[in-house]
Amino acid sequence: MKKSELLFSFLLLPVDWLMIVAGSLLVYAIRYSAWFSNLRPPIFIITASDYAQIVALVAALWLPIFALAGLYTIRANVRLVREFFRVILGCSTGLVGIVLFIFFRAQLFGSRFLILAGYLASIIFVFLGRIIVRHIQRALLKKGTGVVRLVVIGSERSAEKVVDYLRHDKAAGFAVVRHFHKLDDAAWGSIRNIGRDHSADMIIQADNSLGREARVSLWQFCQEHHLDFAYAADIFEAKTSNFEVSTLAGMPIIQIKRTPLDGWGRIVKRVTDIIFSAIFLIIASPLALAIAVAIKLNSRGPVFAKLARVGEGGKLFTLYKFRSMFVGAHSLKYNPDAHLQELNEREGPLFKIKNDPRVTRVGKFIRKWSLDEFGNFINVLKGDMSLVGPRPHEPEEVGRYTPNQKRLLTIKPGVTGLAQISGRSDLDFSEEERLDIFYIENWNFWLDVQILLRTPWVVLTGKNAV
């Protein structure tokens, strides 16, 4: 736990109370202002002092509700999107409490405007207060105040990425004091000195090849010297994060689930896909028509490209995309005379060329802003794809998958996904695989919501688009 996390989590209590009161008082000032009263004369009158007392009490009663909603859970790097949804949940639950109180008491006060506008103002003000607190916290962390002093053990790429990220992002709240590439006798000697001098707060073991005995020794050392201990879970541990215990012939059977999407999760995801893809296709139809006209005017051929892709369980399906290449472009991909394979910039089974000569003028534009993928929403409605999931890949690419990479076919491919918002076409396939498998093994509804909300920003910034 960061030294500053507890302090700032506690600080949120008075900040939330002040923000609820401030937002409600602003609503009161607006409602009883001269211009608003002339526009809509108030029927219910309450004095400012009486209203302030009620608001102060309601704000205090909302704080336990906020706690139940997880708004004061001490955690690192809480995303603003998740924070915003928790604020909405807390304020909405508080509003329900007010409505029930009015119902059972016959009347608390009779202004629906004050109640509803106060509710909306509370959401805005509380979230704004949390942004301010977060910026203050990040400013202090950048100056080294309240950071966790970290020892990293491991030479794998994951360990290197952790160290590089933390050394460049001072606001993350960690300071890497030592990085040991292997846990040999020399490293153990330095670690013992660190423990004796109290010059670190946490040890992260990021080497999956480290034996169980060495891990246990590290954990015991941290317990002895009051250090926090964290480790990178290996592949088997990641698999066993979703399991179900049952009995068969009187014996306990542990079933390792491929993904949390098994069961009700699959139903929830499919219903969400149908609703939001249908809404998107209706809203975006004028823009889609304009793109279709531009494609027709720019080059000969159909508006839509129908591409073979591999979906859930290895089943082939037809992917719909606005055509961004010349007709016959796919046949050139494996033509040795075209020399396109020599221009491939992706490692592993994938094929990507940043300045692909097969792309049309309109195609470059719609690819940059991901407008060519509008047709994917037709696939979502049909059930071939989901809104969120791994990228859909070509049969030739899937044919070069390793056995472990075939786990990417566990669920339906997605229009967007964790890998897409984390680097789009700039990621190595191994990193893309790691992110997508993490998504498959750790799916939940709110993870989908976060990915969908972050996708427009990634698209608008044109991050690593191809």
Image (spheres, rainbow, N blue to C red):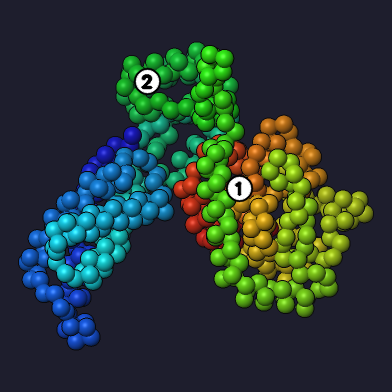
Q: Secondary structure at mark 1?
A: loop
**From the image, which quarter does the N terminus lie in?**
top left
Side of 224 where 270 appears, left or right:
right
Q: Which one is nearer the viewer's eye here, 198 or 124?
A: 124
Q: Which one is nearer the viewer's eye here, 305 or 165?
A: 305
Q: Tag 1: residue type?
A: Gly
Would you call the spot at circle 2 few (<14 residues within 10 Å), some (14-19), or many (20 or more)? some
User: Residue 404: x, y in percent?
Assistant: 68, 32
Q: Secondary structure at mark 2?
A: helix
Q: Quadrant of residue 144?
A: top left
**Which numbered marker is on residue 389?**
1
Q: Earlier in the sequence, mark 1 or mark 2?
A: 2
User: Residue 234: x, y in percent?
Assistant: 55, 26
Side of 405 where 441 appears, left or right:
left
Side of 332 where 364 appears, left or right:
left
Asked if one can make out residue 420 in the rendered structure from this viewpoint, the answer is no
Write down the residue under mark 2: 222
Q: Tag 2: residue type?
A: Cys
